[in-house]
Each structure stands twice: as C-alpha cells, then as structure tokens.
Image (spheres, rainbow, N blue to C red):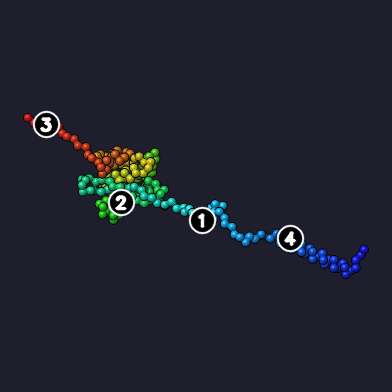
Amino acid sequence: MRLPPLLRRRRAATGCLVAALFAAAAAGGCGLPTDENAQAIDPEDLPETLRPGFTATTTTTVPAPLTEARTVYLLTNPQDIERTIVVEVERQVDRNATLGDVLATLFGEATSVEESDAGYFNTLELFEILSATVIDGVATVDIVHPSPEGEDSAPSADELRFAAAQLVFTAAATEGVDGVRILLDGVAVSVPTSDADAEPGSILRTSAYEQFQPDFAPTTTTSPDIDET
C-alpha cells in the first residue's frame, strides 16, 4: 500500500536520524581509552637511552700529526773529552719524510741558539746537498762545498771528516740504512775517517767514525820493558 507523502517524509527523516546516531556511536567506540590512574614503569622495561643515569658518549677522531721528530747529529767539543764527538738532536720533518728530507735539515742551517749555547756546531752548514738516495740499504749522498763567492771549492780534510761523521750517524739512525757512500759534486772521493782515508766510493759506517762516539775508549798498549844493562 502506498503511503501518503507526509508519512513518507516522516519515515525518511526518522531513518536519517537513526543512521546519524549509529555513526556517532561507532565513532565513539574507535576513540582511545583513557586511564585516570597513571602506572609506574619498571626502569628495566625502558630502553637504555631512557633509563635513569644514562650518559650519552661521543667519539672524537684526532687527526694524525703532520710532522714528527727525527734524529740528526751535530758535533761538539766537550771540555772533559779532548776530541770532537757527535751529539744527538731532533728536527721536525714531515711524517713521510725521506732520508734526503731529514739530511736537508742540516745543510745551510746554523744551530739554534739553545744548541749553540750548549756548545754544539754543524759542519754541514758549510756544504750543500745535491741528492740522497737509498738502494739496498746503502745511502748515496752527493754534496758540494761552495766557496764564499758561491763557487765549488775543495773542503779541508777536517771539514770533510766532520761532515762525513754527521752524515753517517744521521743516516744510521734512519730505518733501512746500513751504510753511506759520499760523493763530492757527483765524484767518488777519498773520505777521511777516524784513523785513515777511505777508498773513493767506499761504504762508510759508524764503526769508521768510532772516535766520534761519546763513549769511545781508545785501546791502550803497554810497551815491553827494555833491559839496557
């Protein structure tokens, strides 16, 4: 049976109201529950970073130093020793420095004020270094001895012996170097040692300059008694 228009409008309105109430009830059921009483959480159940007393740690990367101290040798004449000896000092060089870089710190450079006050001197400041190479543990060092006018000149025997002692001891302090061959302006020359002149091109070691070592003790010999009667 077909309802009158008025009744149809009332029934439609009632259906819309019921649908609206049902939607509101559904929305209320999806809301988050509330708890009026707070509950304490055991610290053991918390993440480590939220536990009482947690201290965050940071890691700082320290860059490697760009330079390092390397051993070189100067000379001195102590009052209690009647001879010239080598003395160990340090020079700052690049941490990847070669033997040539280390030796170069001695050429054309006077001693510092502190070193001079201590009685140290540097014979190598009278020379210039041309090259320094290491092959199979032997360092070949090419040097020149310029005159005050800047021209090459021959060094005295003492100058060459003192310079050689500094070179040999400094090279020996470098890992992988067993001996030194000294050239003078590219030419192999006879280099004075503690007690003789080495053959040109000889490989020199610290044993050839043992009298330059501070703890060197000369060997003494006793002459036999002579009966003159």
Q: Which mark is residue 52?
A: 1
Mark 2 → mark 3, Cα distance in angstroms: 51 Å
Mark 4 → mark 2, Cα distance in angstroms: 98 Å
The residue drawn where x is 26% and y is 44% is: 214
Q: Position of residue 95 (x, y in %)?
A: 40, 49
Mark 3 → mark 4, Cα distance in angstroms: 134 Å
Q: Position of residue 204 (x, y in %)?
A: 31, 40
Callout 3: SS: loop
Dot in front, 4 or 2 = 4
Dot in front, 2 or 1 = 1
Residue topped by disc 2: 125
The foreground one among 105 and 188 is: 105
CB contact under 8 Å: marks 2 and 3: no
Point out the tag, 4 or 2, that comes first from the N-terminus.
4
In this rendering, is residue 228 above or below 149? above
Label 2, residues with CA under 10 Å away: few <14, some 14-19, many ≥20: some
Relative horizontal placement of residue 59, taking residue 67 as reference (left or right)? right
Residue topped by disc 4: 26
Dot in front, 2 or 3 = 3
Check disc 2 and give the amino acid type.
Glu
* Residue 193 in view here: no
Q: Which mark is residue 87?
A: none
Callout 2: SS: helix
CB contact under 8 Å: marks 4 and 1: no
Point out the tag, 2 or 1, that comes first from the N-terminus.
1
